[in-house]
Amino acid sequence: MVCLFTDKLIWAKLFPQKTPAVHLAARGIGGHQVVQQTGIFVIRIGNAVKQLFATHGRGQRRFGIRAKGAGSSPVEKFFRTMDSAVLFPEYIARTVRQGMEENDILPAITATTTVIDAMDYRSIYSIPTDADKELKDVMEGASIPETAVKTKEHLVQLSKRGRMLVASYEAIRFQKLDLFGVMLRQIGAHIQKQQLADAVDVLISGDGNENAATQYTIGTSPISGTKGTLAYDQLVEFWGQFDPYTMNTMLVAPDVMLKILNCSEFKNPMAGLNFQGTGEPGNPLGAKLIRCSAMKAGTAIGLDKGYALEMVTAGDVSVEYDRLIDRQLERAAITSISGFAKLYTEASKVLKV
């Protein structure tokens, strides 16, 4: 986490006397860097100091700041004291993160999430041979067959997504936090949408390590039918291409979702009841259907969620906060760095309708 303040003393009010090993030293705050540039102090907070922000909710209650509901406080209440002002960047980060998590489908398509503290990352891979898959009996005293795990040749491409929030004193300070939070959650939703587009691109085109997904087209062997149409038979044939993996998730473009839901097999009463009750369409194949606006029209991705994709993030949501007093503007730079790596190439495949 990164916090930016124009007042060099504002950070000190955060830490009570009983907090150990947190003090201003020549090298920074408890070993965490403090950089001064033209009167602006940038405080880079590591995990140890960041734990102090875990009391953020109690801090808001301490200063009588109410973030939600009809009686929410104005944004200006964060700035009435130096003690409460230090909580504002963390409030922004948490609200943006909330927007990223609302309607987030990335957990439904990623096998694991790796958090790194650098800009370079190589994932690992293992390509078992047909003999490896057989897992034959090992005789007494014989060597146990090996499965090689290696690092990939190319680095995972990490992308920075974010927004610069710029608002005048008049526009932001006297607005309610409940309304301001809507704007922040929208920024989080936009960041999440871009991350989903990155994930879809890696699933289809690969991560640069010659692992693009196999593509099937309706009307071309082994998928029957006529190009431009979609019936249940084609879904079954596509499902049958995943052995030894299991197609338990399908990402589909909106137009493909309409074609799937119009199949007679998806119109049984139980499927309709489930769709009305949960908003999730039932699937006779057992795969979770997810409509994805990041998909190109006429495209569907089938995948084994447990083996297809790895998400890589460089830390949490970062917030840098500053003010321009000559123009009376509040500025907050909100960024998130992430990327995706393909784990097993055969665990995801593409169907062209």
Image (cartoon, rainbow, N blue to C red):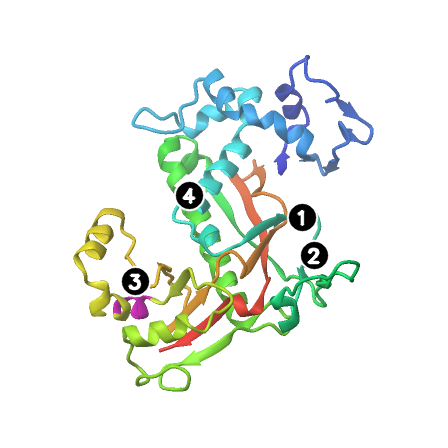
- Marks 4 and 2, Cα distance to the nearest angstrom? 29 Å
Kindly report which numbered mark, 3 or 2, lies closer to the viewer in this rendering.
Answer: 3
Amino acid, disc 1: Ile
Pointer 2 and pointer 1: residues touching (CB < 8 Å)? Answer: yes
The amino acid type found where label 2 is placed reads Tyr
Q: Is residue 268 left or right of residue 224?
A: left
The residue wearing badge 4 is 185
Whether residue 195 is visible = yes
Residue reaching furthest to the top: 17
Residue 271 appears in which quarter of the rendering? bottom left
Image quarter of the C terminus: bottom left
Residue designated by label 1: 116
Q: Which residue is mark 3?
A: 284
Mark nearer the N terminus (1 vs 3): 1
What distance separates the C-alpha of mark 3 from that of mark 2?
39 Å
Across and down, in percent, residue 40 comes to 68, 36
- The secondary element bearing badge 2 is classed as loop
Residues rendered magenta in the picture: 254-258
Q: Amino acid at mark 4?
A: Arg
At x 70%, y 63%, the residue is 147
Residue drawn at x 49%, y 44% as measured from the top left: 166
**Toward the viewer: 210 or 180?**
210
Residue on which the image places disc 2: 121
- Please state which of the two labelled residues, at mark 1 or mark 3, is closer to the viewer: 3
Q: Nearer the viewer, residue 262 or 20?
A: 262
